[in-house]
Amino acid sequence: MDFAQSYGPWALVTGASSGLGERYARALAARGLNLIVIARRKERLRTLAEELHTEHGVQVDVVATDLLKARSMRAIEEAVEGRELGLVVCNAGFGASGRFHELDRNRQIDMVRLNCEAPVRLLHALSPYLIQRGHGGVIMLASTASFQCTPWMAVYGATKAFDLHFAEALTVELGLHGIDVLSVCPGHTATEFHEVAGVDRSATGGAPADPTEVVEQSLRKLGHKMTWTHGARNRWMSFATRLAPRSISAWIAGKILHKRLN
Ligand SMILES: NC(=O)c1ccc[n+]([C@@H]2O[C@H](COP(=O)([O-])OP(=O)(O)OC[C@H]3O[C@@H](n4cnc5c(N)ncnc54)[C@H](OP(=O)(O)O)[C@@H]3O)[C@@H](O)[C@H]2O)c1
C-alpha cells in the first residue's frame, strides 16, 4: 500500500495554523490526503485550506477551536463523522520558559491540559475509527525534552515525557490492530514555539532545524519506528542521557536551559 492507501483518505492535524502542524498539513495534502485542520486561528486555517485545495485538489475542513475547551471534542467528532479517518497527528502544544514558581500558574496548568489531556481525549475518541478500519496511523509530537527533565521549563519537559510514554504504549496496543504509532522528537526547530515559550533564541546554540525537513523525515519513519528523534546530535544526546545517572542529566539540562532564560 502507498502512503495515501495506508493513512488516507482523511487525516486530522491539531495545531495546523503554524509551525510543524502547518508543515504536516502541507506534506499530507501533497500525498493526496484530505484534511481536518484544527487550531484557534481561523483565518490562518482558512487560508491554508484554500491553498492546499488549489494546489493539490484535496478537501480541507477547518475546525477553529480551542482544544482547552470541552466543546472542542464535540466539534472534532462532528467533523470526523462520516469521514474515513486514517491518520491523527497530535501536534498542538506549547511551552513556557522561566522559574517554575514565578511562571503564571494557570498557564502552566493549561500547558498540561493542552499537551497531555487533549491528546488523551482526542485519541480516546478517535482510536475506535482507526481500529474499525484495521489500519492507519498516529503521530505524536514529543520532543528531545521527553528524555530527561528540563529545569527552567519544568512543566513542559514533564508534559513531553508524558506524550512519549503515552504514545509508546499505544504503539504496542494499537499496533495489535494494524495501526502505526510514531513518537516524533524534534530538537530546536524554527517555528513560533520559542516566541510563545519565551525562550531566548540567541542562546539556543546552533541553527534551528527546518520544520519542513523534520516533518518530511518523520513521515518516512511512520510504520517503521516507534520513536524517532530528528538530527544526529539530538539522537546522540538522547542516547547519552539514558546512560548517564539521572542527576547528571538533570544538571546538564539545567546548565543548557538556564542560558535560554529571557
Ligand atoms: N519548535 C520546536 O523547537 C519543538 C521541539 C520539540 C517539540 N515541539 C512540539 O511540536 C509541537 C508543535 O509546536 P511548534 O513548534 O510547531 O509550535 P507553534 O508554531 O507555536 O505551533 C503550535 C500550534 O498549536 C496550536 N495551539 C496552541 N494552543 C492551542 C489551543 N489551545 N487549541 C488549539 N490549538 C492550539 C497553535 O495554533 P493557534 O495558536 O492558532 O491555536 C499552533 O498551530 C508542539 O507539541 C511542541 O511541543 C516543538
Image: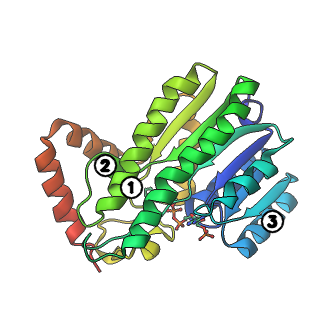
Asked whether mark 3 and ligand 1 are closer than 8 Å, the reply comes as: no
Q: Earlier in the sequence, mark 3 or mark 1?
A: 3
Residue nearest the observer in this picture, 19 or 136: 136
Identity of the amino acid at label 1? Gly
Q: Secondary structure at mark 3?
A: helix
Task: Tell me residue 136's x, y (percent).
Answer: 68, 31
Residue at the image point whose x is 65% and y is 43% from the top: 88
- Horizontal arrangement in the rendering, residue 76 relative to residue 228 (left or right): right
- Please identify the residue farthest to the bottom as the structure is shown: 262
Q: Residue beneath label 2, please?
A: 233
Identity of the amino acid at label 3? Glu
**In this orientation, does residue 229 appear?**
no
Q: Secondary structure at mark 1?
A: loop
Residue at the image point whose x is 33% and y is 52% from the top: 158
Asked whether mark 2 and ligand 1 are closer than 8 Å, the reply comes as: no
Identity of the amino acid at label 2? Arg
Q: Earlier in the sequence, mark 2 or mark 1?
A: 1
Q: Residue beneath label 1, please?
A: 187
Disc 2 to disc 1, C-alpha distance? 9 Å
Which quarter of the figure has residue 198?
bottom left
- Residue 166 drawn above or below residue 197: above
Q: Is the residue marked by circle 3 packed among few (<14), some (14-19), or many (20+) residues within 10 Å?
A: some
Asked whether mark 1 and ligand 1 are closer than 8 Å, the reply comes as: yes
- Residue 178 drawn above or below residue 89: above
The numbered dot on residue 156 is none
Label 3 vs label 2, nearer the camera? 3
The numbered dot on residue 51 is 3
Name the image quarter holding the N terminus. Answer: top right
Q: Are marks 3 and 1 in contact (CB under 8 Å)?
A: no
Label 2 vs label 1, nearer the camera? 1
Q: Secondary structure at mark 2?
A: helix
